Amino acid sequence: MRYRTTIEAQVYAFDDLRQVMAMASPARSGDYLAGVGAATAQQRMAARHVLAETPLSRFLNEALVPYEDDNITRLIIDTHDATAFAAVAHLTVGDFRNWLLSDLASTEALSALAPGLTPEMVAAVCKLMRNQDLIAVARKCRVLTRFRNTIGLPGHLAVRLQPNHPTDDLRGVAASTLDGLMLGAGDAVIGLNPASDSLPTLERLLYLFDEVIQRFEIPTQSCVLTHVTNTLRLAEAGAPVDLVFQSIGGTEKTNLSFGVTPELLDEAHAAALALGRGTLGDNVMYFETGQGSALSANANFGVDQQTCEARAYALARRYRPLLINTVVGFIGPEYLFDGKQIIRAGLEDHFCGKLLGLPIGCDVCYTNHAEADQDDMDNLLVLLGTAGLSFLIGVPGADDVMLNYQSTSFHDALFLRETLGLKRAPEFETWLQRMQITGTHARLLPPQANRLLAGMDALTALAC
């Protein structure tokens, strides 16, 4: 179906809805690399005019990636909740934007609507919104998840403690873990990206984290972010697996490039549930995504990268994850060229994830060859904190020496919490106070009083 609009006597025509969506997107390097971005600002605005007048229901009848060729499209269509969608089924994309920004779109209404929205719908309305609109709507969404603590409460922000080490040395990992805990980080997860796929190494890391959590009675969870097949083998061998991790994408071909299918994730989800290691809840999965992953796998089917990213969220919500985060600037400047594009993408991903009912966080990050710096990350950090981000990443010094990219530090999280008045997961905050790491005001106490520091010898012994 062709789409047309006229602006100042100039006729703009688009081949199909996929092209409308791509050309309505804010300018970014990945879409130009794919050859789908708008050639001019006028063409971009024309596509947005067309998109604003497109009925939301059109996305149920015109698949951007063919139903017959893609299991993510089939998942989106086959699991769509028509009853939940009925509240907005009569709206165009432009009308939907206005509704989202109105008082009618309350927290309760957005929660009820989430199962009725498809990724393409939320990606479409995202393209019509300014940054402040993305913040205002996402801030109204509430998504709570639980394993050993509660993540996503209003006015709260969790932190993933990321103790990566270039050789997976247990002493180095333990030192970074101690650093993060003493600075009040780790309520989202103690989650490490391993340098090795060696099962014995992965097993040693899992036992280290489990011993730390059990010895100090920390109400949090651990995760070694290896491929899902490795985690399955470790769980079968009796290793202490809390969360199952996997990187995912928005098309079947993208996921196959990761060595993943929904059937494999079904198996992993069932295995994690069977372990029964959660004390407060059964949200057992952790996913990471990122704009550009589909194009980098030559698997975008002409769909713009922001829409491909949103489609990954449809796969994630099938498993009710404890955590999902976009690694927004990690894939590189070929996809998000500079700080402006990274900031916009981070707000887009958070908005789309929240509208689809996901506990979405963000790795506020960039690579050293991107036209970005830590000031850009400070800006995105504050914007996402204002928007109600579920969790962010904490890396010693904001510099990941294993993955060789720049992220955010434990001190950045302290800044954001103090500036915006954000709290930690309540169970974790109670533990910090018991360990005399923080006081009743939730601020750090002098290290002399720290009971965790007093147990450092035990932590060192675990790593040796």
Image (cartoon, rainbow, N blue to C red):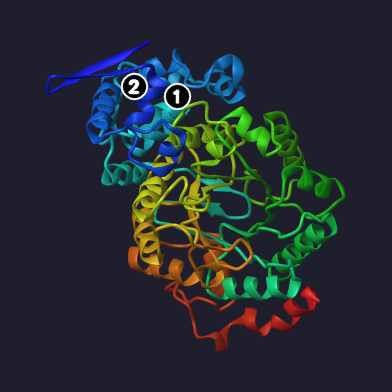
Left/right of residue 217 with respect to residue 74 in the rendered view: right
Q: Residue furthest top?
A: 1
Q: Residues within 10 Å of mark 1 (few under 14, many from 20)?
A: some
Say whether residue 86 is visible.
no
Disc on the earlier residue, 1 or 2: 2
Q: Which quadrant holds residue 296?
A: top right
User: Residue tagged by mark 2?
Assistant: 88
Which residue is at a point 41% across and 23% down the rendered structure image? 18
Say whether residue 67 is visible.
yes
Q: Residue furthest left?
A: 8
Q: Measured from the top left, where is residue 250 in percent x and y?
A: 55, 33
Mark 1 to mark 2 CA distance (whole Å)? 9 Å
Q: Measured from the top left, where is residue 190 in percent x and y?
A: 63, 61
- Please, is residue 97 above or below residue 169 in the view? above
Which quadrant holds the C terminus?
bottom right
Q: Measured from the top left, where is residue 358 in percent x and y?
A: 50, 40
User: Residue tagged by mark 1?
Assistant: 116
Q: Amino acid at mark 1?
A: Gly
Q: Could you say whether the residue bearing mark 1 is in a helix, strand or loop?
A: helix
Q: Amino acid at mark 2?
A: Val
Q: Nearer the viewer, residue 27 or 318?
A: 27
Count of all numbered marks drawn on residues in the image: 2
Q: Residue furthest bottom?
A: 448
Which residue is at a point 77% across and 42% down the rendered structure image? 229
**1 and 2 marks in contact (CB < 8 Å):** yes
Q: Residues within 10 Å of mark 2 (few under 14, many from 20)?
A: some
